[in-house]
Amino acid sequence: MSEPTPEAENPNDPGLSRKTTPTWEMELLVSAGTIVGLLQLPSLLDVVHAPLLNGSSEAFSFLISATWAYCNLVLYTLIATFLVHLCLRAYWVALVGMDSVYPGGIRWEKMRMGPVARALATSNSKPIPDAIEAADNRATRVFGIGFGAAMILLMPVVLALVGLLVAWLLDSAFGPRLAALSFYIVFGAVLVPLLTAQLLDQQLGKRLVPTGWPARMLAQIMRPYRRLGLDSSGNLLVGLFASHEGGRRAGLIAAAFMAPVVGVLMISAVANSGRLQLGNDSGWPRADPSGGRSVVNDFYGSLRGDIGKRRPMPFIPDRVASGDYLPLFVPFIPRLHTHAMEKACPDVLAANRSAPDSVASLDCLARISALELDGKPVAIVFEASTDPGSGQRGMLAMLPVASLASGRHEISLGAPVRRGENPKRYRIPFWK
């Protein structure tokens, strides 16, 4: 192989062109080293999110879910960035390697193709050095844009965390109704001044005297946002890309990059809820917690898989009951049960805000559950308890089953639902 000319050499690597991005080695190191850790974080985030959500009131649940969603968006954006970057860098490495093995580019005269196909291929083909440079720049561009977008998305996470703190303060001082508005209060207080200042600057900025007080006031409003990265001009990575590619083109590329990330998150959420079915042409029924002929694994302590779910299920130890009593654990989910208590026993809920009475609350929750065994009401007493597997708070009921005949039996109880949802009942089959 002939020695490369000095003009074609890279001072860091004699085998690469001078036009090669000087950070390519660091890019590969960061992508490969970081992606392994990032892939572990979404599941860890779910482990933290589920108990927080299931132990919070309705006023806090929206903020917790919003923070979880923003964190997932940042994580999946970074994961997608590093995955795409590794693939693009691998393509670039392959081009550089193949060019060193087969110098001179593609020999079209030796390709088995017709004259029309050859003419079309040669007209669209670029020299290999140009293709290598384009692949190199494409990989660096994806690395920078994805990282810059993740930096911008971190700010909503911070705002959501501030919203949680404000919600806690408002709940302590004024009650849950005002705390539910904390998300809008925080985001409005932070974003409205920035959006207003940017709009005035775009519409009236050319008419303002740079040293006048209106221009100075707009600058004072926008300066902290730029330092915090809420303004895209304050993000060097995004600013470089947008200024060279143009605002409209940059927006379209960013939307094209983010759309698959958001789509994956939405599909994942639907799949985790059990509502996603593909190719179910046979009409086979899915496992329905309210169906009379479904044996849902989450109803049994010995069969439960992932216990960190967004809506935990009541459960008994196993599908086969043994002994004189059958323990039934019913999770207490404040964001759902509080709504039911407001309708069933508002006096108990109102009294609890000033002087909590656990006995009255447990009796109220027992009435809401309306427990039935084989279709007949069962007078039971709820005891406050905790799920040892997940730490979820809940109620324990000991069902007398000593006199039951051998065969199939069914426990039925009311399921907590969101505001506006139709009432549902869990149906838990078991055998004796």
Image (cartoon, helix red, strand yellow):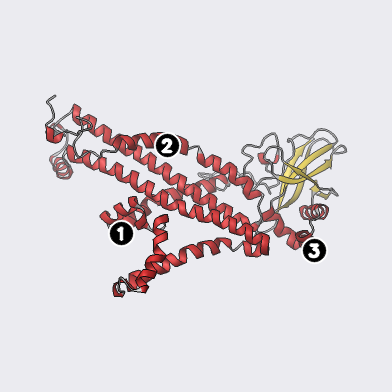
Amino acid on which the number 3 mark rests in the picture? Asp
Q: Position of residue 408 (x, y in %)?
A: 77, 39
Q: CA distance from mark 2 to mark 3?
A: 54 Å
Decide if residue 259 is on the left or right side of residue 354: left
Residue 118, quarter of the rendered image: top left
Can you identify the residue that label 3 sits on?
Answer: 347
Can you identify the residue that label 2 sits on?
Answer: 34
Can you identify the residue that label 1 sits on?
Answer: 247
Q: Are marks 2 and 3 in contact (CB under 8 Å)?
A: no
**Tag 1 or tag 3, which sits nearer the N-term?**
1
Which element carries disc 2, helix, strand or loop? helix
**How many dots with numbers?**
3
Q: Position of residue 410 (x, y in %)?
A: 77, 43
Residue lying at 20% horizontally and 33% vertically, measured from the top left:
11
Q: CA distance from mark 3 to mark 1?
A: 58 Å
**Outermost residue, bottom side:** 207
Which of pointers 1 and 2 indicates the residue nearer the eye?
Answer: 2
**Tag 3 or tag 2, which sits nearer the N-term?**
2
Residue lying at 79% horizontally and 39% vertically, measured from the top left:
327
Residue 216, quarter of the rendered image: bottom left
For residue 211, the mark is none
**Outermost residue, right side:** 403
Q: Position of residue 225 (x, y in %)?
A: 42, 59
Q: Position of residue 67 (x, y in %)?
A: 54, 52
Residue lying at 34% horizontally and 40% vertically, measured from the top left:
85
